[in-house]
Image: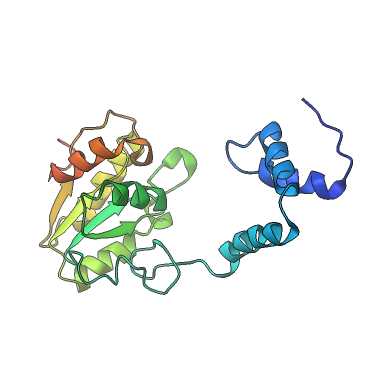
Amino acid sequence: MEFNFPSKVLFRAIESFNSLPGVGKKTALRYTLNLLKMEPDEIMRFADNIKRLAVDIRFCEQCHNISDQKICDICSNSSRKQDVICVVQDVRDVLAIENTQQYNGLYHVLGGVISPIDGIGPSDLNVESLEERVKSQNVQEIILALSTTMEGDTTNFYLYRKLGNFPVQISTIARGMGFGDEIEYTDELTLGRSIINRIPYKGGNK
């Protein structure tokens, strides 16, 4: 469905919302018109919050999670287990696991999974920094919490081969999720149990 817009400013705002994943033109139009119902100072605060994503957001120098500081609140929290690292695909998985309230260790965000068809190899991921953490820190366990997809399993196996020579236990979350499931879409109860009931990784033969 095509729209004729009476204002170029309105059109550009709608285009911005429409550029977001899962936001169609009708939804983008609704968002924009709702903003116009707000007071000007409310719109400015909204715009400022979005602008700060580009200006103020940074990534933790240790785990690559989103942070307001050089080291994120999770990594700097001394009450968390500093010798356990849960390896995830992206920030959304950190949020999903944190919501289960069943994990109290640290994280390492890879930034993706190995996917040759998409041109993503190990060098495109945060693998080297994970290896450095295992070398330099007293890490006792690595939990591989990647999606149960072919790409996730391939990445698990690569990390197992990469870290297998270090004196560290390598575990994987229990298969409470079906094959092809993404961590972020798994319900909290299932995900929490999968982390609690994690099992030793057997090099692809789970």
Q: Quadrant where the N terminus lies?
A: top right
Residue that extends furthest to the top in the rendered view of this protein: 1
Q: Quadrant of residue 17?
A: top right
Please indicate, yes or no, whether residue 173 appears anywhere in the rendered image: no
**How many labels sit on residues?**
0
Q: Name above or below for residue 89 compared with residue 151.
A: below
Relative image position of residue 164 (x, y in whole percent): 16, 55
Residue at the spot x=73%, y=55% of the render? 39
In the rendered view, does 35 fall on the left or right side of 96? right
Relative image position of residue 120 (x, y in whole percent): 44, 47
Q: Name above or below for residue 13 compared with residue 50.
A: above
In the rendered view, does 142 fall on the left or right side of 98? left
Residue at the spot x=21%, y=60% of the render? 105
Q: Nearer the viewer, residue 8 or 131?
A: 8
Q: Quadrant where the C terminus lies?
A: top left
In the rendered view, does 165 fall on the left or right side of 158? left
Relative image position of residue 32 (x, y in whole percent): 72, 44
Residue at the spot x=27%, y=48% of the render? 158
In the rendered view, does 157 fall on the left or right side of 8? left
Q: Name above or below for residue 86 compared with residue 26.
A: below
Tell me how the rendering is colored: rainbow
Residue at the spot x=45%, y=70% of the render? 68
Q: Nearer the viewer, residue 129 or 98?
A: 98
